[in-house]
Image: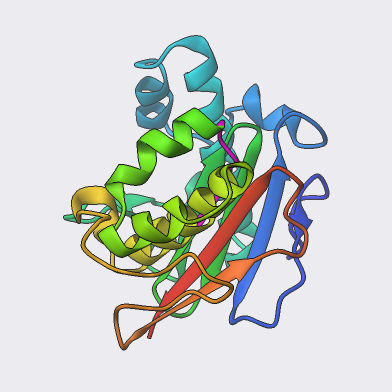
Amino acid sequence: MPFHSSFTQLPTDLPAALVLADTAASAAWTREDDSVLTEQERNYAKEFDAEAAATWTAGRVVLRHVLGAHLDRDPAGIEIRLDSAGKPRVDDCEFSVSRARRLVLVAVSEDPVGIDVEAVPEHAVAAEAMRLLHTKERAELEALPADDLAAGFVRVWARTEAFLKALSTGLARDPGMDYIGTGEQPDSPHPDVDIHDLDEGIPAGYTAAIAFNR
């Protein structure tokens, strides 16, 4: 079954289907049409303020439609449960979802997978948040020209979040424990986890990465 016409399937040679939805443009309907959500999901969204609720709802609606297309099933009938680490799962495939402002990015794979998309932050935000990273990564970022700091930080942060999602720990594991690096190629700290930057199809002002736990 093809993915929803308002979504974009990103080209990739990696062993995953990558689907991007812009919830401020062609996929804006996902912020209002919650018909595929469960009552529990709708009640969960109500715990946030209006904008956060719309953002969360859009992400879950996109995810359900992507899974429905991949599994050839009714999106509303798919059971999404949380594992012991709080990671959402389904029985018939591995997936990961990430939200950044207007964008929702979903990966579906046979292997445990983690994906992350991030908007490039302001310099001051990056300078503050980089203290969460590995000491060696902080040193690498501090050596960059000031104008490159935010882009350098968000690249390593996206890699780190993707890696931690692939491990199924998320940020319950200290992101400063593992060195992944700020260079052109990520350096995986785990022998069974591959980390890749995603460039093609990612809009300007955003950075994305994916990791596979084989």
- Position in image of residue 86 (x %, y %): 24, 49
| Residue drawn at x 59%, y 82% as measured from the top left | 15
**The magenta segment:** 116-122
- Position in image of residue 104 (x %, y %): 61, 44
| Residue drawn at x 35%, y 25% as measured from the top left | 44
Quarter of the figure that contains the C terminus? bottom left
Instruction: Name the residue at the top extreme.
Output: 50
Quadrant of residue 29 in the image?
Answer: top right
| Residue drawn at x 64%, y 65% as measured from the top left | 198
Number of callouts:
0
- Residue 168 within the magenta-colored segment of the rendering: no
Quarter of the figure that contains the N terminus? bottom right
* Residue 27 visible to the viewer: yes
Instruction: Name the residue at the left extreme.
Output: 84
User: Is 88 rendered above or below residue 37?
Assistant: below
Quadrant of residue 137 in the image?
Answer: bottom left
- Position in image of residue 178 (x %, y %): 26, 67
Q: Is residue 193 left or right of residue 31?
A: left
User: Is 33 rendered above or below residue 94?
Assistant: above
| Residue drawn at x 57%, y 42% as measured from the top left | 146
* Residue 64 visible to the viewer: no
- Position in image of residue 203 (x %, y %): 76, 48
